[in-house]
Amino acid sequence: MNKKKWYDYLWIFSTLYIILGFFNILFAWLGWICFITPLVISITQGTKGYCNRYCGRGQLFSMLGGRFGLSRKKDMPRWMVSPYFRYGFLIFFFTMFFLMLWNTYLVFAGADLKQVVTLFWTFKVPWHWAYHGTLFSPGVAQFAFGFYSMMLTSTLLGIITMVLFKPRSWCVYCPMGTMTQMICKIKAHEK
Amino acid sequence: MKKAFIDQNLCVACGCCLTACKLNAVSIPKGVCAMVDYSKCVGCGMCAKKCPASLITIKEESANE
Ligand code: SF4
Ligand code: SF4
Ligand code: SF4
């Protein structure tokens, strides 16, 4: 029962994803996998199979916070566990996501490419060293910068709450986790 | 005998308790929230330790009725 399965190693993918973004920003496009897979599983199977099994990020946090002892293992504040906060964060996250898509569209339409990674939706960090041009439109690169900003920000948020609270505290307010649970709830209700 | 009780209204169905339970007493049917199979649970508390939202309490079974 304790035998490791192939999917127990998906944390390697999550780690690699963050590292690759430091070398070539275009790898950020791979992040779609972490967006589409949980949705497909919840819509087709009606389960949170992604969170429960395949999410490398969850595994990474539970490993760093657990085995490597990087977590205080304290209870999260109750307001962070409340549906108001979780759904509020989901709405905020997707608003920012669509804003990012809009900025990508502007670059496709001719605006200048901004070679920055925006952390916590506020701090602009120069990231030109990970951009070596693209064969496609600069918009493709703009999306990569935007998408990577989002992934890096959420990883950092996850690390902060991992250290402060329990290893997988991020999973309480992770927008993908909240959204897939919402889909599952709707599906379960329909039947 | 002590058993695990989950606050199902707040459960986020992350599955940390699922992987923590060595006796396979936890399941997350339809991805909605975690449920404990009381015929299997021995109240060891492994799941409670892992729940990131701290929603699991270990208490005497009769205390819930
Ligand atoms: S809640 Fe988010 S980080 Fe946690 S397992 Fe699910 S998708 Fe992964
Ligand atoms: S208390 Fe122990 S046996 Fe019961 S559900 Fe939790 S981990 Fe499993
Ligand atoms: S670990 Fe906690 S929040 Fe996650 S599924 Fe189990 S009871 Fe629910």
Image: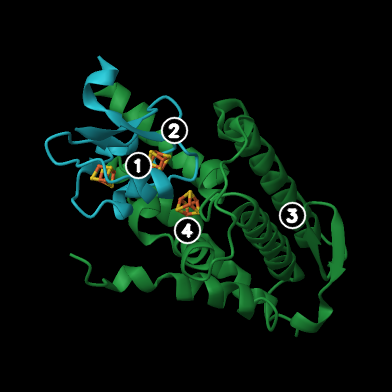
Chain colours: A green, B cyan
Q: Which residue is denoted by mark 1 in the rendering? A: A43
Q: Nearer the viewer, mark 3 or mark 4?
A: 4
Instruction: Please give the name of the residue rendered at 80% of the width and 83% of the height, measured from the top-left corner.
Output: A129
* Residue ID for mark 3: A105
Q: Are marks 4 and 2 in contact (CB under 8 Å)?
A: no
- Per the image, the residue denoted by label 2 is A182
Work out whether mark 2 precedes mark 3 in sequence or the reverse, and give the earlier one.
Answer: 3
x then y, percent, for residue A140 = 68, 68
* Figure quadrant, ligand 3: top left
Determine if residue A131 is in view: no
Residue located at (58% from left, 34% from top): A86
Outermost residue toward the left in this view: B39
Q: How crowded is the residue under tag 4: few (<14 C-alpha within 10 Å), some, or many (20+)?
A: many
- Is B62 above or below relative to A54? above
Which of the two discs, 1 and 2, sits closer to the camera? 2
Q: Quadrant of the C terminus of chain A?
A: top left
Q: Position of residue A49 (x, y in %)?
A: 32, 51
Q: Nearer the viewer, mark 4 or mark 1?
A: 4
Q: Residue extending furthest top?
A: B65
Mark 2: amino acid: Met
Residue carrying label 4: A58
Chain bearing tag 3 is A
Q: Earlier in the sequence, mark 4 or mark 1?
A: 1
